[in-house]
Image: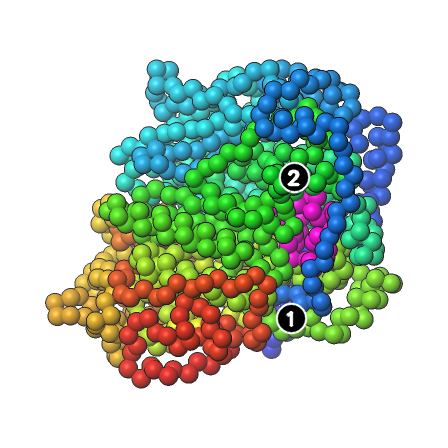
């Protein structure tokens, strides 16, 4: 049965590409937002809407004149008719003229008095202070401070997973209370106990004050639990504190896995709404209801946030940066100062926006029950941060909000003390010992900042970022018995020409190699490594659009836009460039990041080969669900179970924000070609989606690789400790002689066979079950397939191994009864896709596949060296090959690190 409606132009399945998504007539014209954008190539609010928002802000300021706080208060995004959000989801880069770094001399206005005292406070020394002074030097207002006892919870609890040490599970809980200052009247205590146990087994955990000013105090409680032979449930509460809401549960629970098992993982990204989105039309954060329902049935042990856990873009529309954003001339905007008064107002906005969003149900419920691991992305700061032109990124305003966003990112998402000060154009220059931003005494009045906390779970970058004067926080953690985790901070060090410093890559790979080696030496090696990146790394290209937007014809249009407003919102409100390009520049597949990307993938391949560990990449950002993968060139005929180049990129985005129009997803599907990373490695998106969720029609018939609907992912190991049960095979089938157990480690002494995808084996060994098979439901969405039908498959967008056979809604990983119940050591991956945006319960339809464990003991490829920052590939789209001239990857061009099949030497690769 067909699930699609015929397009308006039968001869063009993508005829709706340039049609606004309001054309479907679903919205009554009288009900539409009068400030909706008429533009179709943009993602931010219309100029009319921006003008309307500024007028509202001015009216509010006039009403408050003469009384009350002048600080901006965060509020929900305003209603807006649906807009064709192509800008958020296209994938290329901006090339701008002459971007040589210019020396910048900040406009400092040193404040000498109080500087020594401020530094004493930061160093933890006792200093007598005036309790009647506010943070900004005024008189304390009791109405602003709230309850004087400091026992009322403003936000929280928020629980984080930190690391494992031996048989100890270590986490933390953050609670934000109202009121505070340099000293606190008391220290709260958290009570931790095993569920069902009595008071005799209660563990008191005393709080650590991370940060406190006249507005709020941030308390951190460290939790330590001894892991046991079975999964355990724990409860915690903070009896000393009270919730403002009477419905908020006083007792929260968490689950800790058995010492012999790996963690059940939930992954999400893009957890908020863009400015101008009609929140009611999308039922708010409805998918978190589905998350909590699945958590109740099969508890998650860890919740991984892939970036954009909060959207702070509203600061430029209805926040304190609205006046700055309204400046039409980009040069004037670049020279705009960021004085202490503006810094304080922006600080207030970020704080209130975090408290508001992290207290929003049902997201708030998940915060208190599922331990988190997070990295940040641009919307945690402001849209496109790091991907605008260099001169603009170094302006006072962007340096200021970058520091403020980092401050609250450290507090709310990592439970770490922030730097003592953030940038303003009035700041005192940092001393040689302080480095980074230094201490501003204006920000330290009646304020306490805990000394820096160093933890083994972090890989701290060796130098501060180019636009945020702080060091990147990358992570390594053990997710139970056989899964390792690496999270890369790809925002702190980002520019338009680099994602991370070469030295940071070296630190990450050195630490990963150290941990993998120690695990192997202990006799309990890691079998999987989860790598968290903010944006997809195996994703389609749109170089043709990049070429259009970087062509000389855009120059006159930019000039007319600056002088006459020509093109309106087609150009962004920051540096005056085409509005699409900050999002496009973010991607690893962007032209400016291509060489860095290729080196990175080749180094990951080397890690897989050295330790026989399977790497699976998690990414978000693009508001689509997809499954990309790297794999060995089919002509090498290497089974996936033995292929260290096989890495799946699970793309799950967004859990809250609205998806792009179907036309955008369909366009990306059309651009899903087979690309060549180098002579040995290909990449493409997998045809995962056998149908649209429920009875909906979200994509074109030809589109089986991108799903424009809100979603999140679940990942569970098929533990070798599980009992063998029917349906425990990789594709949901019961194991039989036809599908043999996993093959023994690949040995180059026995090269691949000429007649199939399984290698030749020594006498007495079993034939492998991994073949490049067809999957009939991927050839026609209305047909089912027999997972045992396996033939050599010429289309790598179809299944490459038995874990991908029958992928989608019929796979065993998509069935809660069989998800993670196998015993072959593979990972069951399930992307839960929203069925109906109007369903406030957020019901989803699951799409699953299995990623096999790696079994490899062949030669290890040489280690790649990361390229210098700012380098970029000059090759055209599809010329991703590090195996081409100028190869800078794992080994020299043309080097084969394992025996080649007959007639494969001198193989010519067509560059797509």
Q: Which residue is mark 1?
A: 545
Residue at point 72%, 55% (across, down): 103
Against 605, residue 64 (above or below) is above
Which x, y percent locates residue 894?
39, 77
Q: Which residue is mark 2?
A: 431
> Which residue, as the protein is rendered here, is positioned at the far left?
764
Residue at point 43%, 45% (across, down): 476
Which x, y percent locates residue 692?
50, 59
Magenta highlight range: 378-402
Tell me, for residue 843, which label it has, or none. none
Q: Residue 656 in magenta? A: no
Q: Is residue 652 visible?
A: no
Which of label 1 and label 2 is nearer to you? 2
Instruction: Look at the image and name its color scheme.
Output: rainbow
Give the image quarter of residue 546.
bottom right
Residue at point 41%, 26% (across, down): 235
Q: How many marks?
A: 2
């Amino acid at each position: 049965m067909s699930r699609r409606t015929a397009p308006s132009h039968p001869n063009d399945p993508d005829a709706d590409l340039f049609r606004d998504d309001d054309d479907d007539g679903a919205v009554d014209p009288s009900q539409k937002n009068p400030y909706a954008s008429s533009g179709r190539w943009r993602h931010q609010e219309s100029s009319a809407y921006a003008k309307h928002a500024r007028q509202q802000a001015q009216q509010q300021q006039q009403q408050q004149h003469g009384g009350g706080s002048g600080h901006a208060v965060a509020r929900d995004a305003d209603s807006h008719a649906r807009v064709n959000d192509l800008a958020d989801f296209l994938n290329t880069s901006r090339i701008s003229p002459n971007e040589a770094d210019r020396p910048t001399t900040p406009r400092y206005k040193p404040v000498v008095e109080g500087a020594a005292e401020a530094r004493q406070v930061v160093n933890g020394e006792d200093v007598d202070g005036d309790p009647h002074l506010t943070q900004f030097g005024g008189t304390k207002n009791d109405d602003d401070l709230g309850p004087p006892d400091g026992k009322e919870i403003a936000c929280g609890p928020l629980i984080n997973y930190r690391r494992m040490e031996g048989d100890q599970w270590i986490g933390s809980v953050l609670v934000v209370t109202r009121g505070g200052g340099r000293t606190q009247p008391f220290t709260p205590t958290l009570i931790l106990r095993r569920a069902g146990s009595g008071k005799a087994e209660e563990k008191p955990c005393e709080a650590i004050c991370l940060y406190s000013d006249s507005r709020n105090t941030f308390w951190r409680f460290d939790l330590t639990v001894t892991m046991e032979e079975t999964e355990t449930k724990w409860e915690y509460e903070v009896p000393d504190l009270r919730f403002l809401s009477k419905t908020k549960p006083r007792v929260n629970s968490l689950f800790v896995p058995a010492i012999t098992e790996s963690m059940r993982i939930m992954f999400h990204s893009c957890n908020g709404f863009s400015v101008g989105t009609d929140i009611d039309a999308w039922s708010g954060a409805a998918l978190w209801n589905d998350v909590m329902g699945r958590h109740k049935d099969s508890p998650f042990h860890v919740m991984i946030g892939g970036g954009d856990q909060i959207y702070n873009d509203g600061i430029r529309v209805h926040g304190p940066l609205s006046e700055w954003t309204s400046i039409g001339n980009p040069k004037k905007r670049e020279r705009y100062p960021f004085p202490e008064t503006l810094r304080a107002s922006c600080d207030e906005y970020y704080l209130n926006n975090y408290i508001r969003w992290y207290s929003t149900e049902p997201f708030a419920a998940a915060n208190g029950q599922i331990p988190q691991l997070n990295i940040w992305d641009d919307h945690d700061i402001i849209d496109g941060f790091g991907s605008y032109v260099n001169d603009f990124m170094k302006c006072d305003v962007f340096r200021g909000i970058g520091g403020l966003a980092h401050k609250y990112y450290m507090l709310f998402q990592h439970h770490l003390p922030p730097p003592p000060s953030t940038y303003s154009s009035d700041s005192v220059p940092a001393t040689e010992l302080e480095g980074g931003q230094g201490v501003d005494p204006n920000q330290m009045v009646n304020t306490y900042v805990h000394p820096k906390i160093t933890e083994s779970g972090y890989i701290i970058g060796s130098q501060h970022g180019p636009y945020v004067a702080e060091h990147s926080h990358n992570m390594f953690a053990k997710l139970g018995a056989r899964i390792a985790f690496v999270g890369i901070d790809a925002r702190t060090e980002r520019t338009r020409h680099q994602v991370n410093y070469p030295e940071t890559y070296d630190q990450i790979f050195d630490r990963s190699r150290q941990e993998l080696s120690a695990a192997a030496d202990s006799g309990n090696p890691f079998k999987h490594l989860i790598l968290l990146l903010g944006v997809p790394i195996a994703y389609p290209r749109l170089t043709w659009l990049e070429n259009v937007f970087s062509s000389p014809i855009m120059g006159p249009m930019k000039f007319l836009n600056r002088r006459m407003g020509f093109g309106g919102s087609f150009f962004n409100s920051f540096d005056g460039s085409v509005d699409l390009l900050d999002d496009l520049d973010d991607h690893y597949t962007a032209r400016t990041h291509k060489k860095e990307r290729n080196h990175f993938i080749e180094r990951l391949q080397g890690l897989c080969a050295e330790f026989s560990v399977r790497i699976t990449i998690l990414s978000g950002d693009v508001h689509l669900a997809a499954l990309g993968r790297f794999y060995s060139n089919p002509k090498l005929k290497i089974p996936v179970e033995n292929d260290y180049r096989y890495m799946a990129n699970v793309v799950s985005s967004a859990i809250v924000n609205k998806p792009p129009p179907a036309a955008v997803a369909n366009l990306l599907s059309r651009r899903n070609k087979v690309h060549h990373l180098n002579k040995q490695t290909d990449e493409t998106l997998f045809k995962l989606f056998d149908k649209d969720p429920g009875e909906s029609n979200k994509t074109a018939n030809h589109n089986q690789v991108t799903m424009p609907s809100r979603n999140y992912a679940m990942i569970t190991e098929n533990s070798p400790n599980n009992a063998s049960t029917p349906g425990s095979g990789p594709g949901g089938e019961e194991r039989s002689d036809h599908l043999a157990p996993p093959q023994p480690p690949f040995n180059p002494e026995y090269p691949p066979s000429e007649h199939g995808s399984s290698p030749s084996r020594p006498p007495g060994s079993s034939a492998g079950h991994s073949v490049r098979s067809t999957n009939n439901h991927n050839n026609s969405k209305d047909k089912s397939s027999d997972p045992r039908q396996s033939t050599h498959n010429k289309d790598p967008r179809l299944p490459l191994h038995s874990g991908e056979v029958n992928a989608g809604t019929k796979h065993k990983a998509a069935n809660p009864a069989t998800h993670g119940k196998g015993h072959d050591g593979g990972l069951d991956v399930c992307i839960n896709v929203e069925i109906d945006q109007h369903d406030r319960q957020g019901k989803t339809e699951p799409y699953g596949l299995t990623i096999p464990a790696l079994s490899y003991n062949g030669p290890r490829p040489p280690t790649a060296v990361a390229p210098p920052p700012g380098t970029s590939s000059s090759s055209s789209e599809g010329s991703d090959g590090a195996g081409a001239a100028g190869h800078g990857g794992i080994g020299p061009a043309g080097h084969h690190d394992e025996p080649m099949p007959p007639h494969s030497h001198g193989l010519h690769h067509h560059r797509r």
